[in-house]
Structures are given as C-alpha cells and as structure tokens.
Amino acid sequence: MPIGTEYLGDGWRDADIDGLPPLQVRRPVMRDIAAGGQYWWIACVRCADGTPLLAEGVAAADLRVEVGNAIIAEVMKERPIQAPKGASGG
C-alpha cells in the first residue's frame, strides 16, 4: 500500500521559546535537510504571523548558539506519530 499524505510532514504549530517573539515550527521533511545544508532547520521556523524568522540580511550563521539550539530543540521536539484511521497500529 502506498504511503499517504499523513506521512508527508506536520503542519505548523505554535512554539514558546524564552526570549524570542511568538514562533511557529514544523517538523522537517527530507527536502529541508537536503536543500538547507547545516542550516536546514531555518526552513522549519517562522514568526507567528507567518513572516520569515530572519530579517532580510540576517544569516542563520550569525544567531547566538543558544538561540539556534533552542530553535532546533523545538523543531525536533518529539511528537507521536498517529496511524491513519482504520490502521491496525501494529
């Protein structure tokens, strides 16, 4: 049976990271990691209003390490994978 859209990635969710404005994050998909190099995670975070996290001219490489680490931890926060309706789950 082919993989359905339920396995293609999560939607955006609100994230609360101390010291940062309200953000939304999503779990990465393979495309993010392949295209983004070491800063793949930047594609998985945005401001709560939908605007990009980084202002024009600001590079992910220039973020303080603790800020980058907090964002990565939030992006990668484990969430349960739910089986599709009607699946046996095992």
Image (tube, grey):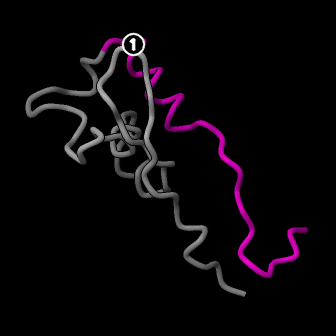
The image shows residue 66, relative to residue 78, as above or below, that is above
Q: Position of residue 26 (x, y in %)?
A: 46, 48
- Image point 20% across, 32% down: which residue? 54
Asked if residue 23 lies left or right of residue 17, the reply is left
Q: Is residue 60 magenta?
A: no
Q: Is residue 82 magenta?
A: yes
Task: Please name the residue that numbered disc 1 is placed on.
Answer: 65
From the viewer's side, name the closer residue of 73 and 31.
73
Q: Position of residue 50 (x, y in %)?
A: 24, 48
- Image point 20% across, 44% down: which residue? 51
| Viewport quadrant of the C terminus | bottom right
The image shows residue 17, relative to residue 14, as above or below, that is above
Magenta range is 64-90
Asked if residue 7 lies left or right of residue 32, the reply is right
Q: Position of residue 62 (x, y in %)?
A: 24, 18
Q: Mark 1 belongs to which amino acid? A: Val
In the picture, residue 55 is in which quadrant? top left
Classify mark 1: residues with Cα within 10 Å, few (<14), some (14-19) or many (20+). Answer: few
